[in-house]
């Protein structure tokens, strides 16, 4: 009887483990498709910049187009990482120019300030990572 109880308990925990197992074939980048990315960013801009319904739709269309083209560049294995980064920068510049035609000057300034803050934060993060890498090299 005791062995049967232990067997059932082990079987229960194995079943629970498989129920909580995650699909590891997807990466974090695969979480959102282009429409999902556009929707997420457009909704955030709608709230932060107090966009009109028409502006929201136009911003969504721009974000979806840029996201699709960005995903295509990421999946293009013929591009080097430097070329891919250049494509990303061109797409970001295009998004900025297209936003200018949709947003008021005050909204565009607020969005641009937000983007600059994000870029500065990313650069700080990259610098810290670089410093850590250099420190490890110096230790060896």
Image (cartoon, rainbow, N blue to C red):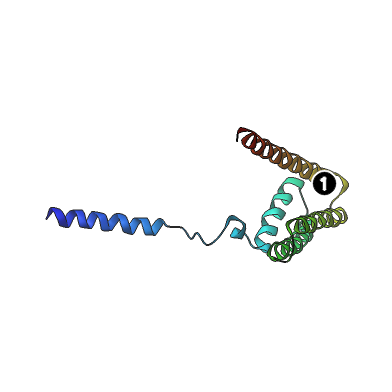
How crowded pointer 1 is (Cα within 10 Å; few <14, some 14-19, many 20+) is rated as some
Residue at the far left: name it: 1
Residue 113, image x and y in percent? Answer: 80, 41
What residue sits 62% from the left and 57% below the top? 29
Q: Identify which residue, 67 or 60, lies in the foreground.
A: 67
According to the picture, the residue beneath numbered tag 1 turns out to be 107
Quadrant location of the C terminus in the rendered image: top right
Quadrant location of the N terminus in the rendered image: bottom left
Residue 11, image x and y in percent? Answer: 27, 58
Residue at the far front: name it: 140
Q: In the picture shown, does residue 129 fall above or below 59?
A: above
Q: Quadrant of residue 95?
A: bottom right
The answer to whether residue 135 is left or right of residue 13 is right
What residue sits 50% from the left and 59% below the top? 24
SS under mark 1? helix
Residue 59, image x and y in percent? Answer: 77, 57
Q: Identify which residue, 74 or 100, lies in the foreground.
A: 74
Q: In the picture shown, does residue 64 fall above or below 6?
A: below
Residue 132, image x and y in percent? Answer: 64, 36
Q: Say how many tags the image has.
A: 1
What residue sits 88% from the left and 47% below the top? 105
What residue sits 59% from the left and 58% below the top? 31
Q: Quadrant of residue 92?
A: bottom right
């Amino acid at each position: 009887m005791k062995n049967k109880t232990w067997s059932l308990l082990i079987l229960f925990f194995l079943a629970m483990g498989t129920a909580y197992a995650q699909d590891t074939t997807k990466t974090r980048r695969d979480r959102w498709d282009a429409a999902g990315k556009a929707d997420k960013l457009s909704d955030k801009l709608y709230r932060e910049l107090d966009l009109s319904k028409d502006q929201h739709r136009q911003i969504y269309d721009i974000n979806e187009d840029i996201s699709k083209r960005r995903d295509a560049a990421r999946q293009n294995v013929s591009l080097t990482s430097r070329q891919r980064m250049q494509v990303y920068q061109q797409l970001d510049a295009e998004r900025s120019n297209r936003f200018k035609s949709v947003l008021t000057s005050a909204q565009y300034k607020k969005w641009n300030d937000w983007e600059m803050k994000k870029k500065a934060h990313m650069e700080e993060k990259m610098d810290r990572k670089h410093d850590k890498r250099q420190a490890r090299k110096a230790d060896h």
